[in-house]
Image: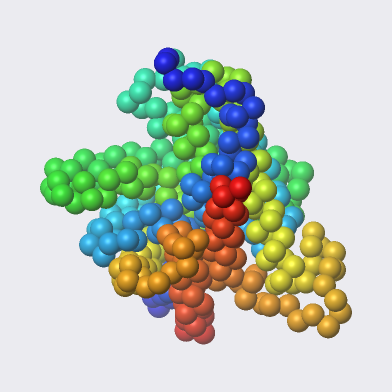
Amino acid sequence: MSQKKATLMEEFLRGIWKENPILISLLGLCPTLAVTVSAENGLAMGLAATFVVISSSMLVSLLRNIIPSEVRIASFIVIIATFVTIADRYLAAYFPEISANLGPFIPLIIVNCMILGRQEAFASKNNILRSALDAIGVGIGFTLVLVVLGGVREILGSGTLFGAEVMWSGFHPWAVMILPPGAFLALGLMIGVSNWLNELGEKK
Amino acid sequence: MNLIIIFISAALINNFVLIQFLGICPFVGVSKKMDSAVSMGLAVTFVMVISAAVTWLIYNLILVPFDMQILEYVAFILVIASLVQLVEMFIKKVSKPLYDSLGIFLPLITTNCAILGLALISVLKEYSFMESVIFGVGAGVGFTLALVIMAGIREELELAPVPKHFKGAGITMIIAGCLGLAFMGFSGLI
């Protein structure tokens, strides 16, 4: 390999901001928009997806020389589906309330393009340590955006954060923020702001 | 009558893309041009209807009698992946230009959450066979509708002075939000 290998730290940090799965690559938008009615839901979804991406990246990386390339996508999906079933059963058993809130969006982690994207673009070509670091970085980036988006929508839409009152007493909640259109509006603004921040960073 | 309600509800009131957030990736990715939006919509509708039927049969005739519901996700995703492969080969044979214009998004229908979501929601709501199929048709029509409206707006948007940081994804999301608001107007329909 002639190209200089990225350091382990870079593999890890890349997913958090520079190649953030949601804000930059626009992957995994469906769960992002659907579950971020509150910060708590965002956090639960983010952690579940992080678990799945880390475990499946490590397994795919271990199996990368065995899986024939013609059926790799199908194999990745079956591996991901297995881990999602584990996460789904775990949440249903220990956090029935959160599991009910997230509804079909936990099984839908299977078809989250962010996770499949990491397997195809990274884990199937790199060793297990790098794949794990990359997956952790992407997972953290994904969770962060979900929590911030959930937090903003919860504060504006219901006047609370993680269930605690944060706004002044006369505050009138903007109901639109917790309705479906609010998700699109909030994410659109977030993408715009992150582009602006990136540009500010480049100028310096 | 029940079937009509399921159809209208899936297509308009609970529009898969704008209200339930299923299938956002192709919605953002393929909505730049009108003709690819139409063909993407048709391909997705086709896969949706067939997969609604097949997953219903697999769930109720195989998984339930053998008490293996835990394999639900794995079984569904395999059915969908093979269907998409079939559609891909079919389109490649019939129309090469269409195949090229859909590009990477064709195999990605596999990971279109709208299709797996449809199968999962049918199971959750305990629909009968006919109801699942109609639900699939309605969802497909709703998806195509949202995609086509979006493509129409984005073609015009090329000429609009959008603030530079919002170009592309940002403005698309905000427009989708406005469309979502409009679709919420359908909520009193039934």
Camera-nearest residue between A131 and A11: A11
The relative height of residue B25 versus residue B163 in the rendered view (above or below) is above
Q: Residue B134 versus residue B183: which sits nearer the camera? A: B183
User: Is residue A66 in sight in this rendering?
Assistant: no
Question: Which colour assignment does the render follow?
Answer: rainbow
- Residue pictured at 79% horizontal, 62% vertical: A161
Q: Nearest the camera: A46 or B131?
A: A46
Is B94 situated left or right of B29 in this image? left
**In this rendering, would A111 be left or right of B90?**
right
Quarter residue A14 falls in: top right
| In this rendering, position of residue B42 left or right of residue A41 | left
Asked whether, in this view, residue A60 is left or right of residue B159, the answer is right
Residue at 39%, 27% in the rendered image: A72
Residue B116 in sight from this viewpoint = yes
Q: Is residue A69 above or below residue A20?
A: above
Residue B41 picture location, percent across and down: 31, 60
| Pick the front one: A68 or B62 | A68
Relative image position of residue A30 (x, y in whole percent) = 52, 55
Q: How many marks?
A: 0
Identified at 55% across, 28% down, the residue is A57
Quadrant where the image shows the N terminus of chain B: bottom left
For image coordinates 23% across by 50% down, the residue present is B101
Q: Position of residue B89 (x, y in %)?
A: 21, 40
Q: Position of residue B167 (x, y in %)?
A: 44, 62
